[in-house]
Image: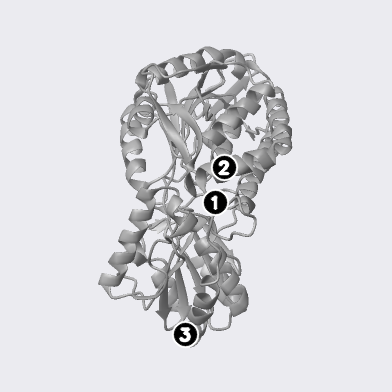
Amino acid sequence: MAKEYQNFINGKPVPARSGKRYENRNPADRDDLIGTFPSSGAEDVADAVAAAKAAYPEWRSLPSQARGDIMRRTTEMLVEHKEEIARTMTREMGKILKETRGDTQEGIDTGFYAAGESRRLWGTVAPSELRNKMTYVTRQPMGVWGLICPWNFPMAIPSWKIFPCLTCGNTAVIKPATLTPATVAEFARILQAAGLPDGVLNVVYGSGAKVGEALLNCPDVCGISFTGSCEVGRHIAEVTGKELKRCSLELGGKNAQFVLSDADLDLALEGVLWGAFGTTGQRCTATSRLIVEAGVYDKLLEMIVERARKLKVGNGLDETVEMGPLVSDTQRNTVNGYVEIGKKEGARLVLGGEALTGGAYDKGFFYKPTVFGDVTPDMRIAKEEIFGPVLSVIKVKDFEEGIRVLNSTRYGLSSAIYTKNVDRAMKAVELIESGIVYVNAPTIGAECHMPFGGVKDTGNGHREGGWTAYEIFSELKTVYIDYSGGLQRAQIDNA
């Protein structure tokens, strides 16, 4: 019998007030029911926010090192449960076990980083312009945060939000993605077992239209951290802007790998296969475009088609599988719609372009690795985020044209350049308009101690990951201490 999950409010399992529930099924095998979850609404969010608000004064008063100790114990337990978390994640999201183990490891790395960061939530000390006076800046927690997560990284992305948010002394209400709620449920259980006080983290399941909107509009929520689509991100920015709430947005990408004629083509091949078809292309950093200098275009395209044709697609629980399903039938339809758009626009379909059917494939949302050649920069498949295993290959005549094409989208998350010429590599790093640049490595592969995020429509300037995440979840306080024993007037001519 499938497990019945509940909301997690004030340290206790709580059903949705509506009494309604929804199913969470394996996208590789719709007969595999992982569990049922509450379909929550505004009243459930209000209960969760009230619990977080009540827990905030005591939690913020703890020394940051004490909060960090809980993050460390949590992370040690994540290590112990890594394999079962990875298997749950593969069942609910679809990506292969090698990737869900990596997803879990990202959470582990982020947790250990948070434990260390708790001992150095540094401010700044600066000299005063007056005698017998001290000035410094410290970081302070903010209150109750709303955390809204996507479905493609069910452990890594929640960990990017939860660990720094709580370590800074805030409390939170998290809304997991409706398609991948079970991993966050396990995360919350482990946090509680590690000693997290009741009410510090609360989990409310349900749709963005109900749970997400309630979080946005709750007056006791001080900030929203969201990862997802540009369209939803714009709406969140509008709502939070009216209330002057802190808002951190990590949105879409249309990432390109640029291969120069002098590149190691075998290395570039491995990079584009991993970047385009890892996670079935369902990453905001996925390699959706391949820009190739004319001299090696035909050869590299031939190499890609030969290798991509051999990729084994199937249930991610099978250790021999290299690419899992798309997360839902809706996502598969979206991907197939873009394939049809590419055909109509005149791109040359050289591989794939259709769903995988027959046998076990009929139980899931599988799609063939797909490659388009002769793509031009003005085509929709070269400009819009597809979020599936579709690679658009674009020919350019030289380095300068390649950089122009690479920068010609409204997104700017991740980019890669493959070349043996260090001068060209460094010039590309300077000219590429993206928040992340890789040299001789694919567009995916962020590390937890480094800032993650992008420019243009990819976000609003904040960066998750690394020390910058702690800037999102804290407020600066400037302090002046005058020990002169008399009135001193700063910025007044005392001569």
Of circles 1 and 3, which is in front? 1
Residue type, mark 3 in image: Asp
Say left or right for 372 vs 324.
Answer: left
Residue type, mark 1 in image: Lys
Q: Classify 319 as above or below 312.
A: above
Q: Residues within 10 Å of mark 1 (few under 14, many from 20)?
A: many
Using the image, tell me which numbered label, if any, was put on residue 95.
Answer: 1
- Measured Cα–Cα span from mark 2 to mark 3: 38 Å
- Residue 385 at x, y percent in the picture: 38, 57
Q: Residues within 10 Å of mark 3 (few under 14, many from 20)?
A: few
Look at mark 3 in the image and give the residue it sits on.
298
Q: Is residue 138 visible?
A: no
Mark 1 or mark 3, which has the lower sequence index? 1
The answer to the question of whether label 1 and label 2 lie on touching residues, with beta carbons closer than 8 A, is yes
Say left or right for 89 vs 372.
Answer: right
Look at mark 2 in the image and give the residue it sits on.
89
Q: Classify 18 as above or below 342.
A: above
- Measured Cα–Cα span from mark 1 to mark 2: 8 Å
**Could you tell me which quadrant the N terminus lies in?**
top right
Mark 1 or mark 2, which has the lower sequence index? 2
Residue plotted at (53% across, 57% down): 314
- Residue 325 at x, y percent in the picture: 48, 54
Furthest residue in direction bottom, as rendered: 295
Residue type, mark 2 in image: Met
- Residue 189 at x, y percent in the picture: 62, 26
Which sits in the foreground, 80 or 69? 80
Label 2: which secondary element: helix
Q: How is the image coloured?
A: one colour
Label 1: which secondary element: loop
Which sits in the foreground, 95 or 120? 95
Q: Is residue 419 visible?
A: yes
